[in-house]
């Protein structure tokens, strides 16, 4: 698998796959703890409801870095939060 790298404004350099796995797990946990549904997530982030539903249910295994970045910005989180 070829890895693509992305550098974010805060100097974080990530491989796409690394972000996807950790980012999805963090997003699921964050949304569950804060009672954020796929519908609410889609409304604040501009990502489709179907896509958000699949992310939160673990049926989307490889979202793009830009999608994770859009979601993190909409939730007021730093993308580095997705790597904790």
Image (spheres, grey):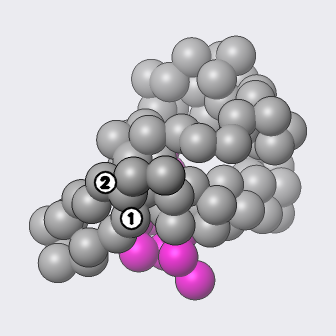
Q: Earlier in the sequence, mark 2 or mark 1?
A: 2
Extent of the magenta region:
71-84
Q: Is residue 78 shown in magenta?
A: yes
- Name the image quarter holding residue 32: bottom right
Q: Which residue is mark 2?
A: 4
**In the visual, does 61 lie left or right of 71?**
right
- Is 75 rendered above or below residue 15? above
- Is residue 76 visible in the rendered image? The answer is no
Instruction: Label 2: state its secondary structure.
Output: loop
| Quadrant of the snapshot with the C terminus | bottom right
Q: Secondary structure at mark 1?
A: strand
Which residue shows up at 17% across the image and 78% down it? 11
Q: Is residue 36 above or below residue 60?
A: below
Majority SS type along the magenta span:
helix
**Is 28 on the left-hand or right-hand side of 57?**
left
Q: Which residue corresponds to the image point at 64% horizontal and 23% vertical from the top-left? A: 51
Taking 30 as reference, is 36 above or below it?
above
- The mark tally for this picture is 2
Q: Which residue is mark 1?
A: 15
Q: Residue furthest front?
A: 1
For the residues labelled 2 and 1, the Cα–Cα distance comes to 6 Å
Frontmost residue, 77 versus 54? 54
Q: Which mark is residue 23?
A: none
Residue drawn at (34%, 69%) of the image: 14
- Answer with left or right where residue 69 lies relative to residue 51: left
Say which residue appears at 34% left-offset and 41% top-offset. 66
Quadrant of res 67: top left
Compared with residue 8, is residue 10 higher up or lower down, i.e. above or below? below
């Amino acid at each position: 698998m070829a890895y693509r790298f992305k550098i974010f404004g805060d100097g974080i350099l990530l491989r796409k796959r690394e972000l996807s796995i950790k980012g999805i797990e963090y997003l699921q946990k964050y949304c569950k703890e804060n009672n954020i549904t796929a519908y609410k997530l889609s409304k604040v982030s501009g990502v489709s409801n179907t896509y958000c539903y699949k992310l939160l249910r673990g049926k989307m295994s490889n979202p793009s870095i830009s999608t994770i970045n859009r979601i993190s910005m909409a939730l007021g989180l730093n993308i580095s939060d997705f790597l904790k």
